[in-house]
Image (spheres, rainbow, N blue to C red):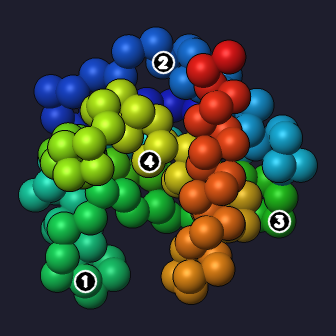
Amino acid sequence: MISFNYETDFNLDEEQGFSDWISNTILEEHCKEGEINYIFCSDDYLHKLNVDFLNHDTLTDIISFDYSVGKELHGDIYISVDRVKENASDFKVSFDDEMARVIIHGVLHYCGYKDKSEDDEKMMRSKEDYYLAKRNL
C-alpha cells in the first residue's frame, strides 16, 4: 500500500495516479509492493532527519528509510518540497516533472538501484527516465 503524508502545506495532485504509477513500476521491477509511505516536508524538517539519523549536515531533496524484506518493498520516503522547487529551477524543468523524478527515485532505491558511483548514477537516471516516460502515457 502506498500512502502520501504531508508535513507541509503542499498537497500532491492525483494521488491515485501517482500510486498506480509507483505500483506498476514496482511490478515491472519484479518486486512486491508492501507498505510505502511518502512524507512531503520542508527543508528544515528533512535537514533535521539528515543530521539526526544520517549524521549529514546538508540539505537534500530525499531521504529514504528502507525496511524491505527481500523483494517485498517497505519504507518511508521523505521529500523536501522546498528542495524539489529549487532543483526544478536549477535544472530548468517544471516542478511537477522534478517531483515525479524524486518520487520514482525513492522507490527505485528500494528496487535495488544505487546512485553512489558514476555507473550506478547513470543506471538510476536511465531507470528514472524510463519510468517517467511511462507515466506520461
Quick one: SS at disc 2?
helix
Query: What is the C-alpha distance between the residues marked 3 and 4?
Result: 23 Å
Looking at the image, tell me whether mark 2 or mark 3 is earlier in sequence order: 2
Q: Is residue 42 above or below residue 117?
A: above
Quick one: SS at disc 4?
helix
Query: What is the C-alpha distance between the residues marked 1 and 2?
Result: 31 Å
Query: What is the C-alpha distance between the residues marked 3 and 1?
Result: 27 Å
Q: Which mark is residue 70?
A: 3
Q: Quickly name the residue at label 4.
A: 102
Q: Residue at x 64, y 76 (%)?
A: 120
- List x then y, in percent, for residue 68: 69, 61
Looking at the image, tell me whether mark 3 or mark 1 is earlier in sequence order: 1
Q: Residue at x 28, y 50 (%)?
A: 91
Q: Which mark is residue 56?
A: 1
Looking at the image, tell me whether mark 4 or mark 2 is earlier in sequence order: 2
Q: Can see residue 32?
A: no
Q: Is 128 or 59 nearer to us in this picture?
A: 128
Q: Please name the amino acid that badge 2 sits on.
A: Glu
Looking at the image, tell me whether mark 3 or mark 4 is earlier in sequence order: 3
Query: What is the C-alpha distance between the residues marked 4 and 2?
Result: 15 Å
Q: Quickly name the residue at label 2.
A: 15
Q: Please name the amino acid that badge 1 sits on.
A: His
Mark 3 crowdedness (10 Å alpha carbons): few <14, some 14-19, many ≥20: few
